[in-house]
Image: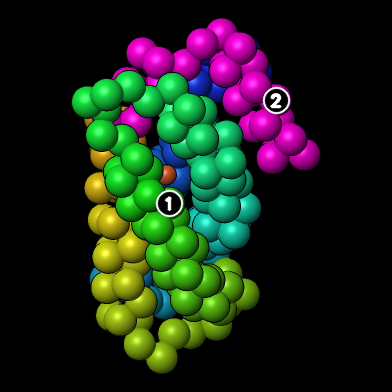
C-alpha cells in the first residue's frame, strides 16, 4: 500500500459499498422469495460487517481523523463533523451486531421468523451507511488530500497496515 493509496482510504469502504449493493439485491430477493436465499452472499455480508467495517472504522478513527485534526486550519470546521462520523461508526457497528444473528441463521440454512423486518433493518442499515460514505467522500477525503503531508500519509499507511494485521 502506498501512502497516497492510504489517504484514499477507501478500500474497505469500497468493499462495503460493493457488498451494500449485493446485500440490497439480496434483501430484495429475501422479501420476494424467502425460501431462495443466497447463503454465500450471506457469508460475504457477514464477513464484511464483522471484519471489514470495524477495521475501516479503526483506520479512520485512529489513523485518518487524528491527522486531519492535527492539520486543521481556520475555517475547516471539521472537528464536529469527525466526531459525528465517529459516533455513526459506533451506531453502525451496533446495528450490524443486530443484523448478524439473522444473517448467520440464513447462512446456516435457517428460516427467519420475520423476513420483512430483517429486510427493513437491512435497508435502513445500508441507507445510513451510504449517507455516511457520501459525507466522508464529499468532505473528509478532499480535506485529507488538501491538508495531509507526505509524512502524515506514511504514518497513516503504517497504521492501516497495523489494523489489517
Ligand atoms: Fe467512516
Label 2 CA crowd tier, 10 Å (few <14, some 14–19, many 20+): some
Q: Percent position (x, y) of residue 13?
A: 45, 38
What residue is at 70 percent from the left and 38 percent from the top? Answer: 164
Secondary element type, mark 2: helix
Q: Which residues are magenta?
A: 139-165
How far apart, in angstroms, are the residues tagged by discs 2 and 1? 21 Å
Counting from the top left corner in percent of width and height, residue 151 is at 61, 12
Q: Is residue 44 left or right of residue 37?
A: right
Q: Quadrant of residue 159?
A: top right
- Please identify the residue farthest to the left as the structure is shown: 75
82 or 104: nearer the viewer: 82
Residue at 38% x, 49% y is 83
Circles 2, 1 touching at the beta carbon (< 8 Å):
no
Residue positioned 34% across, 31% down in the render: 140
Residue at coordinates 57% horizontally, 17% vertically from top-left?
153
Q: Quadrant of residue 46?
A: bottom right
> How far from the left and from the top, in percent, is residue 103?
51, 71
Q: Mark 2 — residue?
A: 158
Query: Is residue 111 in sight in this rendering?
Result: yes
Per the picture, the main secondary structure of the magenta-coloured stretch is helix
Q: Nearer the viewer, residue 29 or 75?
A: 75
- Which quadrant of the figure has residue 101? bottom right
Q: Which residue is mark 1?
A: 86
Report the side of 110 relative to 137 (left or right): right
* Residue situated in front as seen by the camera: 114 or 4: 4
**Residue at far right of view:** 165
Q: Which quarter of the figure is the C terminus placed in?
A: top right
The quarter of the picture where the N terminus appears is top right
Most extreme residue toward the bottom, as rendered?
Answer: 113
Instruction: For mark 1, give the secondary structure.
Output: helix
Please state the horizontal and vertical placement of residue 54, each as a whole percent of the image.
57, 52
User: Quick check: 111 above or below 136?
Assistant: below
Amino acid at each position: 500500500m502506498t501512502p497516497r493509496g492510504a489517504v484514499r482510504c477507501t478500500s474497505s469502504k469500497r468493499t462495503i459499498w460493493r457488498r451494500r449493493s449485493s446485500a440490497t439485491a439480496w434483501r430484495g430477493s429475501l422479501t420476494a422469495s424467502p425460501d431462495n436465499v443466497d447463503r454465500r452472499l450471506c457469508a460475504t455480508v457477514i464477513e464484511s460487517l464483522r471484519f471489514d467495517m470495524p477495521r475501516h472504522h479503526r483506520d479512520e478513527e485512529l489513523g485518518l481523523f487524528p491527522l486531519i485534526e492535527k492539520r486543521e486550519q481556520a475555517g475547516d470546521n471539521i472537528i464536529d463533523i469527525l466526531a459525528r462520523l465517529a459516533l455513526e461508526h459506533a451506531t453502525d457497528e451496533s446495528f450490524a451486531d443486530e443484523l448478524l444473528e439473522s444473517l448467520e441463521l440464513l447462512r446456516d440454512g435457517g428460516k427467519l421468523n420475520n423476513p420483512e423486518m430483517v429486510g427493513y433493518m437491512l435497508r435502513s442499515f445500508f441507507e445510513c451507511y451510504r449517507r455516511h460514505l457520501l459525507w466522508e467522500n464529499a468532505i473528509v477525503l478532499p480535506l485529507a488530500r488538501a491538508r495531509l503531508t507526505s509524512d502524515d500519509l506514511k504514518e497513516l499507511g503504517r497504521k492501516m497496515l497495523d489494523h489489517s494485521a
